[in-house]
Amino acid sequence: MEVVISRFNENLDWIHNFNKDIKISIFNKGRDINLHHIKLENLGRESDTFLRFIVNEYPNFNEYTAFLQGNPFEHIHDVVNIINRHSNDKIVYLSNKILIDENNGCPHHCGLSIESTASQLGVYSEKYTFAAGAQYIVHKDLILSKPIGWWKSALKLHNTPTENYRGNPNMAPWIFERLWINIWNLKV
């Protein structure tokens, strides 16, 4: 298992509670820390980090990867124990809230234009079930079911600003939050 953490300025003392056999990769978009980390420009929140990790590591993934925010506890309190005890589920939603939104982001983020991005990625549906916080444990087969070119296109699409949310040009992290379950389950 590898844990990928998208950090801004959160305290990461909690990472020392993982089992010793779990690899931890910290992607830091904030102030420097006294832990081994990869420095990234502060763009695109956790979805940018997760997509960059996939593109850069492809196809050399551990059997399972846990994708986390710098403070995962806002979305799931027992995340460390869940990861430490993980068995062999292909996907685990690491969130206390599983929600459903329409193509316009309602009822949770009304005005969010999901349709265009979802169509370009091939994951369009009328409604989007998603784990609040966009945190998951994913088996490598779900990542590798899409070729590297697909992931590169997803990263480029994510980081291409569009006027898709009340005039804000970069709402991709909130759109991708709603698309991850469809992305993980998409076979290309």
Image (cartoon, rainbow, N blue to C red):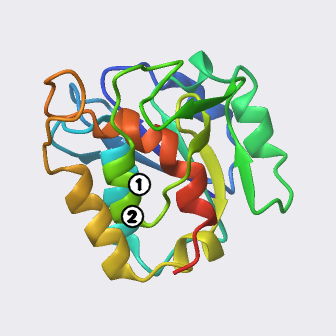
Residue shown at 56% from the left, 79% from the top: 145
Q: Are marks 1 and 2 in contact (CB under 8 Å)?
A: yes
Q: Which residue position is annotated with label 1?
A: 118
| Residue 26 in sight here | yes
Q: Is residue 66 left or right of residue 40?
A: right
Q: Is 13 situated above or below 141?
A: above
Residue shown at 39% from the left, 64% from the top: 121
Residue shown at 41% from the left, 77% from the top: 58
**Residue 158: percent from the left, percent from the top?**
26, 51
Q: Is residue 12 left or right of residue 43?
A: right
Residues under labels 1 and 2: Cα distance?
Answer: 5 Å
Count neighbours of disc 2 (C-alpha within 10 A) and say few if under 14, some if 14 to 19, many if 20 or more: some
Closest to the observer: 60 or 90? Answer: 90
Going by the numbered disc 2, the residue's amino acid type is: Leu
Q: Is 124 situated above or below 140?
A: above
Quadrant where the image shows the N terminus: bottom right
Count all numbered tags in the image, as a single digit.
2
Residue 121: assigned label: 2
Closest to the observer: 156 or 53? Answer: 156
Residue shown at 54% from the left, 18% from the top: 107
